Each structure stands twice: as C-alpha cells, then as structure tokens.
C-alpha cells in the first residue's frame, strides 16, 4: 500500500489561486445544486454531492487547507478515543482489556431445556457452534443466530437461506425478541450490561445460564451426553486435560485475544507488544504442528477448536482490519494446512459463514473502518480453496479419528 503524506505547502492556510476564484464566482445556484435537483438518488448520495460541490467551490482541485485538516484530525481522534473506550476498554498504557463474562456456568442449576444465542462473526460464539455440531446437539440445544446491527448491537432478522449448507442469521426462535439486549432483559431482575454472544438461555426459567464461551463448550462436551447424538466423542479427555489447559494459557492471551489486542490497541506501545506476542506464538505453534496433527497429538481437542476459530478469520479479517500484517496465515505452511484439516471435518464448514464474518467486522466496528466498506474476500479464504487436501492424515497414528466417530 502507498503511504500518502500531505505536501508541506498545504500545512499553511493560503488563498486559492485567482483562476479558481474567478471560476467559482460564476457558479450559479442551479449549477451548484444540480445533482439534488435532477438526480433521483438517495438522500445520502445527494448529501455527498453537495459536500463535493462545496469543497470544489472553496478549494478547487487543491487539498483542503492545513488548518481544516488539523481541526478535523483533532476532532476525529477525540471522537475515536471516546468510541474505543466503550467498544474496547483499555488500561493506562492503551492496551485492550477484555471485560470478564458476567454469567458463569453452574451445571447443577441448568435444565435440559436450553437455547443457544450466537452471532456468526464472533469467534467466541463460533466455538460453541462447532462443539454443538460435533457432539450432535443440534436438536437438544436449538440456536438463534443474531446479525449485526448498524449501532453495533446484535439484532435478529430473517435472512433467506440461499445456501442450506451454512448457518445464516435468524429471528429469535424462542423469545421472539428484536435484539439480544431484549433477551437479556427478560431475566429476573433485568440486565443493563453488555449483551454478548455466545449466550446459553434456560427456556423454562427465562434466565441466562452462561455467557462464557469456554464454560459452554466444556458443558456441551461432557454435560449433555445423554442428549447428544455422538456421546462417545470426547474433546477434553482426562488424560489430556493438563496439556489442553497448557495450550489454552498460551493461545488465549496471545492469539485468541491477541488479535483483538492488536486491533483495539489505543497506543503504539500497546500495539507493538501485542503484535510481537501474536506472531511469536504463531511461529511456535506452526513449528509444533510440523510433527503433530493436532495440538495434543492425534486427537482433536477443545484447544484446537479455540485456535481454529481465530485462524479461520485471520486472512479474512485480522490481517487487514486488526493490523496483524507481519505475515498472512497462508505463509505458515503447517498452520494453514492444520486449519484446512479442521475445516474439512464434517459439520465444521457449515458453521463458517464468511460473508457474515466480514460484514460483522468491517461494517460493525465503525471506529476501525469508518467507511464501512467491505473488501473483496481473499481467494485463499473461499470454500473451494479451504477444501484442498491438507495431507495431514498421515501424521496421525489413528488416521481420521474424528471423522470415524462422527
């Protein structure tokens, strides 16, 4: 990408050339408002045309004067800091500090009539969808899929299902609410905090059971086996728990939350620390996967699911929007093949709606992308490319263990 800097002459307030003033003096009101008078475009288009005409009238073909640039920059920076303080709370150094989940799981208090609320862009919600699918809990735990709202909230909408192979946003299938905040407020005592996904809902008690993603996937893995179609699949076996937890301690702060620490950093120092931790950890994992099919050897575990939901978004979103630009995931031979290996497990691809993921980030996170322009999807993130053979089965002594269980 090109770095464009303003010429030094534009840093000072100066008068436009005389020829520009002469031309401007002959602009009639009819000419000036021509677009809005004759065009049937939307109001936003007419507004843009009006602004364009004003700027041409004032400055002609030259850049706006330096004092205007400086004023707008100061105003935007202040507004950006206010919005980021709400979107992404930070510590005094400007480093992003993720708020803790409000509702933690109490398995003994949960009933068997549960409903899952998710948003497709969210990697934390994505992990619950994958474990739900792999365990065969689709009928036991129905799901409502919220879409992104223009104000950054999670809204329910009925999106035509053009592709039956992937999940799409839906209406609220149990409470018939318009948005997720309304669902949270249905609980006894109400709720005015952050309405986040994933969220597990007790249908009978009308209560939030849990909104901590790792609690939910552990519960789905072992707490509902009597309702699961694949109770024999254990993604957190006792003999691997310590190793899984060790990987989680590495992956969560540096990769899962690491990409957010890069994208939501509010100082150069905070960004530099986050991006260094992210890419050193990715290099470490890539090296490990050179001799191991999954993180914990031959068996797919919860640690793999948690890593996968970040990796599948990396080249799609994080590399560009979150400034994780040192390397693309495609440049990591082992990591990219590993991601494709997990993607190709039956039912996993159906949980990945790439257009919804891109819309959720590029159009929801206004402070990071004020124009809300969604870039074209990288070809390496398309379904056909991700279905290319990973050739990692040979690394496993048990072959396609997970596929056989399913």
Image (spheres, rainbow, N blue to C red):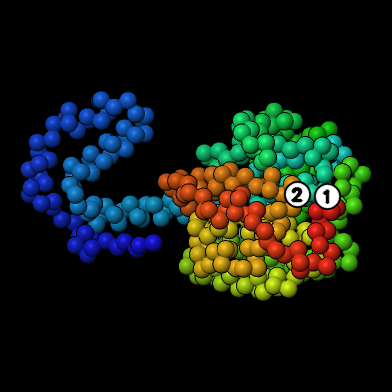
Q: Position of residue 307 (x, y in %)?
A: 69, 60
Q: Give the SS element for disc 1.
A: loop
- Which residue is found at the position 23% from the left and 39% from the top? 53
Residue 19, relative to residue 301: is it above or below?
Answer: above
Where does label 1 land, which residue? 406
Residue 365 seen in this snapshot: no
Residue 26 position in % (x across, y down): 9, 36
Q: Is residue 299 left or right of residue 289?
A: right
Near-viewer residue (114 or 103): 114
On the image, the x and y values in percent for residue 367 come to: 47, 50
Is 101 located above or below residue 332 in the figure?
above
Q: Is residue 375 visible?
A: yes
Look at mark 2 in the image and give the residue it sits on: 346
Q: Label 2 near label 1: C-beta < 8 Å?
A: yes
**Mark 2 secondary-structure assignment:** loop
Is the residue marked by circle 2 packed among few (<14), some (14-19), or many (20+) residues within 10 Å?
few
């Amino acid at each position: 990408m090109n770095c464009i800097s303003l010429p030094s002459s534009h840093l000072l307030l100066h008068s436009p050339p005389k020829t520009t003033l002469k031309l401007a003096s002959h602009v009639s009101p009819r000419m000036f408002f021509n677009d809005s008078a004759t065009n049937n475009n939307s109001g936003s288009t007419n507004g843009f045309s009006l602004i364009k005409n004003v700027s041409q009238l004032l400055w002609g073909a030259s850049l706006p004067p330096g004092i205007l640039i400086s004023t707008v920059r100061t105003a935007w920076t202040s507004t950006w800091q206010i919005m980021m303080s709400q979107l992404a709370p930070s510590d005094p150094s400007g480093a992003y500090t993720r708020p803790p989940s409000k509702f933690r799981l109490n398995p003994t208090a949960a009933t068997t009539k549960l409903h899952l609320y998710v948003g497709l862009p969210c990697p934390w919600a994505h992990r619950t969808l994958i474990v739900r699918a792999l365990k065969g809990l689709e009928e036991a735990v129905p799901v409502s899929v919220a879409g992104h709202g223009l104000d950054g909230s999670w809204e329910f909408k009925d999106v035509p299902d053009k592709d039956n192979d992937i999940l799409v946003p839906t209406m609220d299938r149990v409470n018939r609410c318009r948005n997720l905040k309304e669902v949270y407020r249905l609980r006894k005592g109400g709720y005015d905090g952050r309405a986040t996904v994933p969220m597990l809902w007790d249908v009978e008690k009308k209560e939030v059971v849990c909104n901590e993603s790792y609690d939910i996937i552990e519960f789905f893995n072992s707490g509902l086996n009597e309702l699961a179609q694949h109770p024999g699949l254990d993604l957190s076996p006792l003999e691997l728990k310590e190793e899984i937890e060790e990987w989680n301690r590495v992956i969560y702060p540096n990769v899962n939350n690491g990409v957010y620490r890069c994208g939501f950093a509010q100082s150069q120092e905070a960004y530099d620390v986050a991006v260094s931790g992210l890419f050193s950890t990715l290099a470490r994992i890539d090296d490990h996967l050179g001799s191991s099919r999954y993180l914990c050897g031959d068996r797919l575990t919860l640690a793999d699911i948690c890593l996968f939901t970040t990796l599948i978004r990396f080249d799609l979103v994080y590399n560009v929007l979150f400034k994780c630009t040192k390397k693309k995931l495609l440049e990591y031979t082992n990591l990219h093949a590993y991601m494709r290996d997990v993607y190709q497990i039956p039912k996993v691809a159906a949980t990945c709606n790439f257009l919804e993921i891109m819309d959720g980030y590029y159009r929801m996170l206004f402070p990071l992308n004020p124009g809300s322009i969604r870039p074209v999807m990288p070809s390496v993130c398309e379904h056909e490319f991700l279905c290319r053979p990973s050739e990692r089965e040979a690394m496993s002594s048990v072959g396609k263990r997970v596929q056989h269980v399913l």
